[in-house]
Amino acid sequence: MTNFEPLAATQPGLPNDAITVLGAMAAPARLRILRVLCEGEQTVSALLALQPISQPNLSQHLANLYRSGIVDRRRDGTYIYYRLAASEQGRLTRRICGLLA
């Protein structure tokens, strides 16, 4: 699933932010990515070294998380850094990561 919006529309009792974050965490690869990002900002290459997935697959997951407002990214030269966003989705992700630690 690349967009969590349709699921939110079918669950009127749940906040959209919660649906977005929980939907992202439902995929094992995205959960692993988010748990690493809960520890702090990481480059794509550092995330790739920690993930048992291909670079295109990692990029797809990161793009999904970025579009969902869960992570932010910044470019520094040839490196792209990802971190949890300051959005409500990012704050909720941090709280959930705290529970999983």
Image (cartoon, helix red, strand yellow):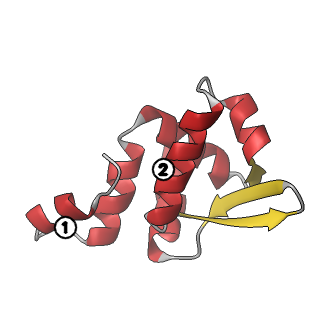
Q: Which label sits on residue 99?
A: 2
Which structural element holds mark 2?
A: helix
Q: Mark 1–mark 2 contact, CB under 8 Å?
A: no
In terms of image quadrants, where is residue 57? top right
Task: Of the two numbered discs 1 and 2 on the same chain, state the one appearing first in sequence.
Answer: 1
Give x and y (percent) for residue 58. Answer: 58, 39
Q: Residue at x 76, y 56 (%)?
A: 80
Furthest residue in direction top, as rendered: 52
Which tag is nearer the camera, tag 1 or tag 2?
1
Q: Is residue 41 visible?
A: no
Give x and y (percent) for residue 26. Answer: 35, 41
- On screen, residue 58 above or below 83: above
- Residue type, label 1: Leu
- On screen, residue 2 above or below 48: below
Give x and y (percent) for residue 90. Answer: 52, 67
Which structural element holds mark 1?
A: loop
- Closer to the camera in the image, 98 or 11: 11
Furthest residue in direction right, as rendered: 77
Q: Residue at x 73, y 45 (%)?
A: 44
Residue of label 1: 14
Question: Viewed as shown, does residue 13 lie left or right of 85?
Answer: left
- Residue type, label 2: Leu
Q: Residue at x 75, y 58 (%)?
A: 81
Q: Residues within 10 Å of mark 1 (few under 14, many from 20)?
A: few
Quadrant of the frame with the C terminus: top right
Q: Which label sits on residue 31?
A: none
Quadrant of the frame with the N terminus: top left
- Closer to the camera in the image, 85 or 73: 73
Q: Residues within 10 Å of mark 2 (few under 14, many from 20)?
A: few
